[in-house]
Image (cartoon, helix red, strand yellow):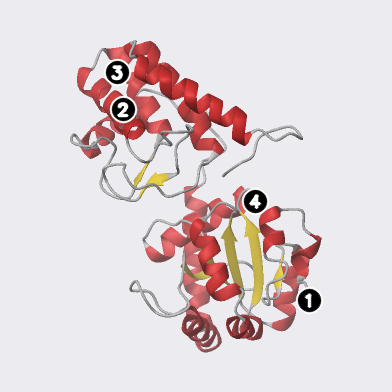
């Protein structure tokens, strides 16, 4: 029997409409239900092209025994992060504050009925492995903690809410003087993190960072900074030479599992590739290197061929 997602329009949510988990969409009525039943909320945020979202769905959300534990102890909410990027941003930030680790998808949040987060993670396996607890075991422990330590968790939640509020930019900008200090600081930090051997920033996993590379290239062209220019162009070259880039069809995968750009995480995002098209055009204009022109032509062809919907618009991910 379908759950409450059956009436949604998001393809990602509809993929979960026949799960044995009693999934609800994010609505005021669902939050009221959590209040009425005095149950914590299990919030799972993902999207259709996310590999680990599908793994967790297959291992846990399609399993009747795991679903029974979820349904007994929680009000379960599924969110498509491409449909609600606002909720995703809020709870990704909350996850960082709670765990001091970067987030990702699937994002697994445990909330009080008013939406205040008190525990978080990303992918959890059904059985304990990868240094992570098994999901059914975690569910029981979190439910017990919510019942037995509610006051302590509520106090922690208020600290998280206060920290999230402090991150919001001030609306009144009167009297603020803008200068180049933030840009200069950002460029220096990126240069410090630059990998001179393989390009990119830091170690594995390596992400595309098109906005950061665009900043380096623009600053280099404006100031004739050879070191900054090399960091940008070398990274763009290495990204396009490795397995991260689809050498046959064009287009970049979301990130590289290793630090040499060889092993891709097999999903292509429109927002990454859209930004990279403009960036590789700028690299071509800046360097006159035909290699960058080839990447632009091949990737633009891939976007038009595989990402354009016959009904209008473009698909968000593949």
Percent position of residue 265, x then y: 42, 50
Q: CA distance from mark 1 to mark 2?
A: 51 Å
Q: Which residue has dot 1 on it?
A: 1
Task: Give the percent coordinates (x, y) of residue 227.
Answer: 20, 22
Under circle 2, the secondary element is: helix
For label 2, the residue is 237
Q: Earlier in the sequence, mark 3 or mark 4?
A: 4
**Image x and y of residue 300, in percent:** 53, 25
Q: Earlier in the sequence, mark 1 or mark 4?
A: 1
Residue 55 place in picture, x, y as percent:
51, 66
Q: Residue pushed farthest front?
A: 248
Q: How many marks?
A: 4
Query: Observer-nearest residue: 22 or 63?
Result: 63
Q: Residues within 10 Å of mark 1 (few under 14, many from 20)?
A: few
Q: Is residue 124 left or right of residue 16?
A: left
Using residue 270 as the reference point, say whether residue 159 is left or right of it.
left
């Amino acid at each position: 029997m379908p759950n409450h997602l059956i009436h949604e329009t998001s393809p990602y949510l509809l993929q979960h409409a026949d799960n044995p988990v009693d999934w609800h969409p994010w609505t005021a009525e669902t939050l009221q239900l959590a209040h009425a039943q005095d149950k914590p909320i299990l919030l799972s945020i993902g999207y259709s092209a996310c590999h680990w979202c599908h793994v967790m769905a297959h291992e846990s959300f399609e399993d009747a025994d795991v679903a029974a534990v979820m349904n007994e102890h929680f009000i379960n909410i599924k969110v498509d992060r491409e449909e609600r990027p606002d909720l995703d941003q809020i709870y990704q930030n909350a996850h960082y504050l709670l765990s001091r680790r970067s987030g990702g998808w699937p994002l697994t949040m445990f909330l009080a009925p008013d939406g205040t987060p008190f525990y978080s993670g990303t992918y959890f396996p059904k059985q304990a492995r990868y240094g992570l607890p098994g999901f059914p075991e975690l569910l029981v422990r979190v439910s017990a903690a919510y019942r037995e330590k509610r006051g302590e968790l509520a106090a922690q939640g208020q600290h998280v809410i206060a920290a999230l509020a402090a991150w919001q930019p001030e609306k009144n900008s009167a009297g603020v003087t803008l200068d180049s200090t933030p840009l200069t600081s950002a460029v220096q930090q990126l240069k410090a993190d630059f990998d001179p051997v393989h390009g990119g920033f830091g170690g594995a996993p390596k992400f595309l960072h098109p906005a950061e590379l665009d900043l380096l290239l623009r600053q280099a062209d404006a100031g004739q900074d050879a070191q900054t220019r090399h960091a940008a162009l070398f990274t763009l070259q290495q990204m396009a030479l490795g397995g991260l880039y689809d050498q046959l069809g064009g287009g970049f995968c979301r990130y590289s599992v290793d630090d040499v750009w060889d092993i891709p995480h097999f999903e292509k995002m429109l927002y990454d590739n859209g930004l990279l098209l403009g960036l590789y055009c700028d690299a071509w204009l800046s360097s006159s290197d035909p290699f960058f022109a080839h990447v632009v032509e091949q990737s633009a062809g891939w976007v038009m061929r595989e990402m354009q919907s016959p009904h209008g618009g473009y698909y968000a991910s593949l």
